[in-house]
Amino acid sequence: MTRVVLAEDGVLLREGIAGVLVRFGFEVVAAVGDAAELMIAVSRHSPDLVITDIKMPPSFQDEGLRAAVRLRSDHPGLPIVVLSQYVQQEYAADLIGTGGAVGYLLKDRVADITEFVAALRTVVGGGTVIDPDVVRRLISRPQDPLAGLSGREREVLSLIAEGRSNSSIAAALFISEPAVGKHVGNILAKLGLPPTDDTNRRVLAVLTYLRAR
């Protein structure tokens, strides 16, 4: 029997997926609601398969996907399937690049339970199952990391690279400081720099800008 750790913050969806798994002969050894609990559960239970949502507390950004990448680093070859409503390109590429026994499925495509279970079994067997839309997005993503930025966002980023504060940038561009803050938030999101406890995202954004010049 395949032992599964399931991570999904939505209680109803978590219970629904767990019910499907049990129905098809899987054993759900832990069902948790956030990435921190996922890490603990995997360490405690040493499962045969991890299924995790991407967006989970506290920020509902990509905690689940980042946890999956860390788990593959800590437990090489651990079969992992991530479920999402969207494609998070940066960490998706990192996860897929860890080798076989990986799945990345979009929730709106997982309509057929039999196909979903077949995908899980493929991953447990060492195969890779990637939603076609995920593949298309990864193949078509721009080579220029700044390609998704607007002209104004590029201006703001260039001034950040000069070491300017938000108030200084606002004065230089004749816009309000809250507008600068909004541009900075958009820049960080478009560059795939989610909030973390141990990195300075403005510094990482500047490094990305300098590498792209």
Image (cartoon, rainbow, N blue to C red):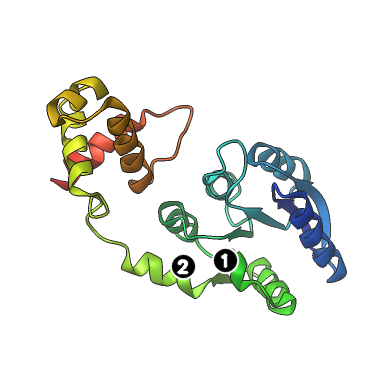
- Give the CA distance from mark 1 to mark 2: 8 Å
Three-letter code, disc 1: Leu
Q: Is residue 19 left or right of residue 162?
A: right
- Above/below status of 31 relative to 201: below
Count of numbered marks: 2
Q: Is residue 77 left or right of residue 159?
A: right
- Where does the C terminus fall, quadrant-wise? top left
Q: Residue at x 69, y 73 (%)?
A: 116
Say which quadrant the N terminus sits in.
bottom right
Q: Position of residue 131 (x, y in %)?
A: 53, 71
Q: Is residue 38 above or below residue 120?
A: above
Residue position marked by numbered label 1 in the rendering: 106
Q: Which residue is mark 2?
A: 134
- Where is residue 115? Give x, y as percent: 68, 78
Q: Which mark is residue 137?
A: none
Q: Position of residue 62 (x, y in %)?
A: 52, 46
At label 2, which amino acid type do we have? Val
Q: Is residue 77 above or below residue 183?
A: below
Q: Check disc 2 and report its element: helix, strand or loop.
A: helix
